[in-house]
Image: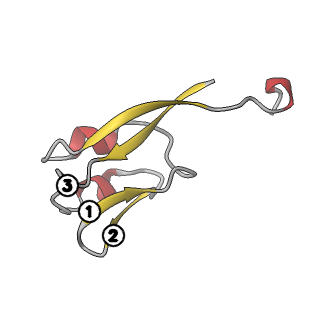
Amino acid sequence: MVKRKAKPNRERCVACGACALQCPRNAIDIYKGCYARVNMELCVGCGLCSQTCPANAIDLMESIEEVKNGGNE
């Protein structure tokens, strides 16, 4: 199964916190006031953070996740 996840770019991030405020799953925090980081367990890849980021510092990356129990979970 392919899923999207947010991936912040530390070099472009201005640590404004706009992405964290928009995240409906609270998957983003501003690490030590320096850059955004994403908790991949919580991120659902909705894209709100990427759309909100004024520095265009968040990309949505596709990742392949294993399907457990034949996909019946």
Circle 2 Cα neighbour tier, 10 Å, few/some/many (<14 / 14–19 / ≥20): few
**What residue do we see at 23% from left, 69% from top?**
34
Please report contact status of discs 3 and 1: CB closer than 8 Å, yes or no.
Answer: yes
Q: Residue 43: horizontal and vertical position, in percent?
A: 49, 47
Where the N terminus falls, by quadrant?
A: top right
User: Please, is residue 41 above or below residue 48 in the view?
Assistant: below
Task: Tell me the amino acid under the disc marked 2.
Answer: Tyr
Circle 1 Cα neighbour tier, 10 Å, few/some/many (<14 / 14–19 / ≥20): some
User: Please, is residue 33 above or below residue 14 in the view?
Assistant: below
Closer to the camera, 20 or 30?
Answer: 30
Numbered disc 2: secondary structure = strand
Task: Name the outermost residue toward the right.
Answer: 69
**What residue do we see at 32% from left, 41% from top?**
48
Mark 2 or mark 3, earlier in chain: 3
- How far apart marks 2 and 3 lie (CA) works out to 11 Å
- How far apart marks 3 and 1 lie (CA) works out to 6 Å
**What residue do we see at 37% from left, 34% from top?**
60
**Residue 15 located left or right of residue 44:** left
Closer to the camera, 49 or 39?
Answer: 39
**Residue 66 located left or right of residue 25:** right
Q: Which numbered marker is on residue 31? A: 2
Residue 59's image quarter?
top left
Where the C terminus falls, by quadrant?
A: top right
Task: Name the outermost residue toward the front.
Answer: 11
The residue labelled by disc 3 is: 13
Task: Tell me the amino acid under the disc marked 1.
Answer: Tyr
Circle 3 Cα neighbour tier, 10 Å, few/some/many (<14 / 14–19 / ≥20): many
